[in-house]
Image (cartoon, grey):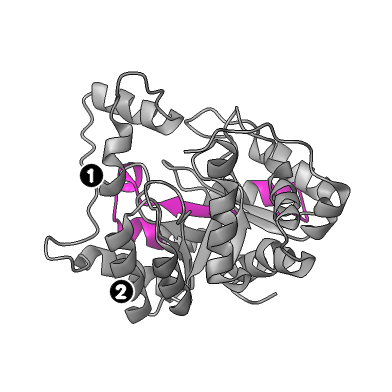
Amino acid sequence: MSEPTPIPSPSAGARELVRGAYDLHVHIEPDVIRRRISDLELARRYSELGLRGFVLKSHYTPTAERAAVVRAAVPGVEALGAIVLNHAVGGLNPVAVEIAARGGARIVWLPTVDAANEAHEAEPRPGRKLPLWAQLQLELREAGLPLPPIEVLNPDGTVRPVVRQVLQVIARHGLILATGHLGRDEIMAVVQAAREEGVQQIVITHPDYPTQNLSFEDQQALARQGAYLERCLAPIVSGKVSWEHTFEAIRATGPAHSFLSTDLGQPQNPPVEDGLALFADRLLEAGFSEEEVRVMAVTNTVRLATGGRA
């Protein structure tokens, strides 16, 4: 794990380069976890900066209805909703996915805070400060609420039937499947199943994060299956993933298969609306071309957000 470093303000050139982008992964208020900014205020700032839209991600509640409120309040900014399949929505619940889809959700994340792969991260250990979500998980357990790890695979490594039901709903509505906080073997199996069930758009959620930590070979294999690799800023600025590793991962898979998101909204991290431009500045400094950065920040995020329509 690298040390977090101070983050400057983004350059004017980077702001212009990411104009028209979507951020497909932000954590903002209202939420049950404290966040840096509200969805309405973020939409206003996006409007001022020429950013096209963002996806509201909550580990606990569906956000499609809230996104509709934001779109009505701030015309011109496309706030999009999502659902994350943790225990708060019934876990691997195809009915919840169906209702979210009918309500306008765009992304379905597989389990995050309740994923079997993430269970050890929510355990308190001496000298370790728990993430905000892990603190909430601990409070829920202390309140007597069971939170068993959500398994997506059978003991023999095959994908559970209920996961395939979820994938079928995603495919029917043309939604994006995001792999959440699954582990390596889970990701590889689920992506294969998603292709078999007809899912067209697949996102590998922060593949470089320590609890995913996919090898470059695995990332290349997933890219060959048509999946997009998500490159998140928050794990980098918090020191969990190094800039150098991120640059290497992008070069290994190619900008055409990667997209930039921020995963921001935590009180201690940079302003959400600055995230994509900050990312762009560092990529340019590392030798990526303006065209490569724009593909990752704008072209690919627009393709995902709109289903390839615009």
Image x and y of residue 171, in percent: 41, 74
Furthest-right residue in this view: 12
The answer to whether residue 115 of the structure is visible from this angle is no
- The quarter in which the C terminus is drawn is bottom right
Image point (24%, 58%), residue name: 152
Whether 73 is among the magenta residues is yes
Q: Nearer the viewer, residue 83 or 264?
A: 264
Give, as a three-letter code, the residue at label 2: Ala
Q: Nearer the viewer, residue 54 or 224?
A: 224
Image x and y of residue 33, in percent: 48, 30
The stretch of residues the image draws in magenta is 70-98
Q: Nearer the viewer, residue 256 or 105?
A: 256
For label 2, the SS is helix
Which residue position holds label 1?
149
Categorize mark 1 by other alpha carbons within 10 Å: few (<14), some (14-19), many (20+): some
Give, as a three-letter code, the residue at label 1: Pro
Image point (43%, 78%), residue name: 225
Image point (61%, 65%), residue name: 305
Q: Is residue 65 above or below residue 143?
A: below
Image x and y of residue 285, in percent: 75, 53
Residue 271 image-quadrant placement: top right
Which residue position holds label 2?
193
